[in-house]
Image (cartoon, rainbow, N blue to C red):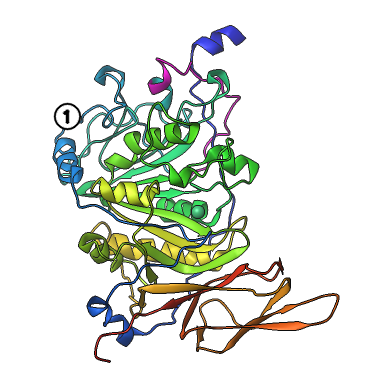
Amino acid sequence: MLFERLQKPSRRILLISLVIPWLSAPVLAETDSAKASKKSEVLIAELAEDESVEDVEQSAPLQTKGKDNKARKPEAPQGGVGIDTPSAGSRKVAPNIDLKQVAPPPEAQVSAPADTDADAAESEVMATEAVAEPEPQPEPEIREGKVFTLLDNDVMPGTSTRLAWTPGIQIAGLSQTTPVLVVNGINAGPTLCLTGAVHGDELNGIEIIRQTMYDLNPEKLSGTVVGVPIVNLPGFQQGSRYLPDRRDLNRHFPGSPNGSLADRIAHSLFENVIRKCDMLVDIHTGSLKRTNLPQLRADMNNPDVAEFTRGFDRMAVVHSSGSAGMLRTAAVEAGIRTVTLEAGESHRIQQHQISAGVNSLTSLMERQGMISRMFVWGDPEPVYYDSDWIRADHGGILFSEIELGANVSEGEILGYVSDPITNAQHPIRSTTDGRVIGMAVDQVVMAGFAAYHIGTEAEVPGE
Ligand SMILES: [Zn+2]
């Protein structure tokens, strides 16, 4: 029995379902539209680098994207994507699943051997107990929606499904797959991809993706939404930011098939999923007990990306050109409009931050013509072209006096570091006027700890 299962990949896939109550509407209303309008004339400064800044250098101009679009177009979809594409013969039609329904629990997973069958394993469809065969004929009212091929599955227009991706780096018989949600609209339109938990301990994005996607009706959608809620499944299972080899996955994109573990995972995701996207939102949180105001990190020197950021409602934008190896950087270089969405802190599920993320993604889909609903736009948030970390100069216990999102002035006291033994109180003052876009939670700190991230809107020449 066991041997049989080893040879024949199981169709049951791990499904992680977080039972999180639906959240109430977002709140972040704080704004300064006047300042926001200055942004285009501003001399752009580089974002200060720090350990929780997910960013870096230069993004290159578009290349592959246009090609991809054309290649993907017609009724006869190409097998998978790019390099890792298996033979077209292995493709199958994905079952139409109502993502709102509870999927059957995963059974003990015994997967295919990694080498030749890895691709087949990737294509396994989750929740096999759901309808095995979708309607063979698309409904007559299909309006130019296209078959969307992903991971060797054809997702018909007007359907939703749950696929599975595995990078094939684990012990073959023990490998686990990561859910990939797809909602393929009945109408033609762009492909928006959402990725969460590239850092395994960053949980808000997982729930942002679930709520955003489970509420989409494929019969009313134009285009396709693809969500990978938990990219770094090993890290997620261990509550760790990193991969089992202690590497940061978000420094290894677009990856390589022959490199380190991180390179291989990055490569598999990038070739099998990311290259299918026209737009990508990679969702993160602050790290190391720091929390981030919901914000986009984007290379505002790239006109396509800058335009893309305008579709997100009530999201501050922090300019950052991105570093080598980041998913955002690699995707932009592949011609995919990409931003990082930061919301809250790691290891936590934060309703307020999640609501802000869901609201913003909903507005994005509306702006891109993918959905139409009554959407009330807030005032535009400012773009922060520069930012500084303010560090503690003394060790002790950090107590903040200000809150995330506060507007502060130069010299203002942001918090104190209190020495529990001597009772000395050391104030930390802002070195600039700006807004608190990220900050440490109250905790024990050492001298040099980056405590407050202050975003500044660069000065307009002549003002
Ligand atoms: Zn992260």
> Residue 381, position in %: x, y?
36, 77
Q: Is residue 371 above or below residue 243?
A: below
Q: Secondary structure at mark 1?
A: loop
Q: Is residue 378 above or below residue 164?
A: below
Horizontal side, residue 133 vs residue 353: left or right: left
Q: Is residue 239 above or below residue 376?
A: above
Q: Which residue corresponds to the image point at 33% horizontal and 75% vertical from the top-left? A: 377
Q: Which residue corresponds to the image point at 40% horizontal and 15% vertical from the top-left? A: 116
**Magenta highlight on residue 382:** no
Depth check: 386 or 24 in front?
A: 386
Depth check: 155 or 378 in front?
A: 378
Give the overall secondary structure of the magenta segment. loop
Depth check: 140 or 54 in front?
A: 54
Q: Which residue corresponds to the image point at 54% horizontal and 33% vertical from the top-left? A: 14
Horizontal side, residue 347 vs residue 24: left or right: right
Q: Which span is picked out in magenta?
A: 100-119
**Magenta highlight on residue 117:** yes
Residue picked out by circle 1: 76
Look at the image and tell me in which quarter the N terminus lies.
top right
> Residue 451, position in %: x, y?
60, 71
Specify the amino acid type for callout 1.
Ala
Look at the image and tell me in which quarter the C terminus lies.
bottom left
- Label 1 Cα neighbours within 10 Å, binned few <14 / some 14-19 / many ≥20: few
> Residue 123, position in %: x, y?
39, 26
Horizontal side, residue 336 vs residue 212: left or right: left
Q: Is residue 180 above or below residue 1?
A: below
